[in-house]
Amino acid sequence: MIFDWNTMVPVLGLAIIQTFQMVGLSLVFTILFGLPVGILLVATDRGGVFETPYGSKRLGAALHSTLGFIVNVGRSLPFIILMVALIPLTRLIAGTSIGVVAAVVPLSVAAIPFFARLVEIALREVDSGLIEAAKSLGATRATIIRKVLVPEALPAIVLGLSTSVISLINYSAMAGIIGAGGIGDIAFRFGYQRFDDAYMITTIVLLVVIVQAIQSLGSWSAKRLSHR
């Protein structure tokens, strides 16, 4: 086993950039769609601020059930199966089924329901007394969500976001096996197919370091945002 850094550094550097691109782009869509879905799962549930949208409790229950079903389906599929199943959609959106941009589609689809559930869990931990106090002061539904629910749950949401980022990194490593690039691609092509232990060990160390850094940053941010 020989660590030829002159050869490895450019290869690993490009792989790290590709991984960050995949995860970064997917994270944007995860937040844009996952956060509202998580909020709606709580707001349209029994006793939620949107339990009766447009004055209809039946509509609220239907919306909650539909969102819950979609989220459960998204979370129940292993990523490798989801990635293959979404190849037609990926080609439709990205114009190709390989590469960094193509990987964003299955990564986002996998991460959105996962993050939505974490947001739901975080929001359910908010003291119901704060919500009732806001209602008694005449706050609108949107104001309760913006000024009470989300701010109070923000530390837990940030922790959930860091967990989602780590999951995206794990997913991106699997996406690399089918041509998405990134650290997983290097581990598979160089470490596994060429039996090069130097690449395998280095990619493992890189992933561990990146995951530890993200988890530490998430924990630190959550503490800073905590009101306790």
Image (tube, helix red, strand yellow):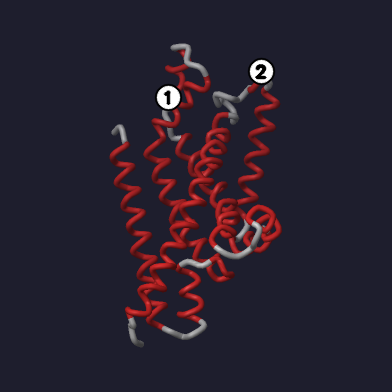
Q: Hey, what amino acid is under mark 2?
A: Gly
- Left/right of residue 159 with respect to residue 106 in the rendered view: left
**Are the residues tagged 2 and 1 within 8 Å (C-beta)?**
no
Quarter of the picture containing the C terminus is top left
Name the mark on residue 132. none
Left or right position of 86 against 112: right
At x 45%, y 68%, the residue is: 183
Q: Residue at the spot x=50%, y=51% of the render?
A: 25
Question: Dot 1 surroundings within 10 Å: few (below 14), some, or many (20 or more)?
Answer: some
Residue 123: image x %, image y %?
47, 35
Question: Of circles 2 and 1, which is in front?
Answer: 1
Instruction: Identify residue type, mark 1.
Output: Lys
Viewer-proximal residue among 171 and 26: 26
| Rendered position, 223 above or below 145 | below
The residue lying toward the viewer, choosing from 68 and 32, is: 32
Disc number placed over residue 55 in the picture, else none = 2
Q: Determine the residue positioned at 35% across, 48% down.
A: 218
Quadrant showing the N terminus: bottom left
Marks 2 and 1, how far apart at CA:
23 Å
Q: Nearer the viewer, residue 181 or 30?
A: 181
Q: Element type at marker 2?
A: helix
Label 1 sits on a secondary structure element that is: helix
* Rendered location of residue 146, percent (x, y): 46, 26
Residue 133 in the image: x percent, y percent?
42, 17
Q: Residues within 10 Å of mark 2 (few under 14, many from 20)?
A: few
Q: Which residue is mark 1?
A: 147
Give whichever of discs 2 and 1 has the lower sequence position.
2
Q: Is residue 25 above or below residue 59?
A: below
Q: How many marks?
A: 2
User: Who's the residue at 34% across and 59% down the image?
Assistant: 212
- Residue 223 x %, y %: 29, 41
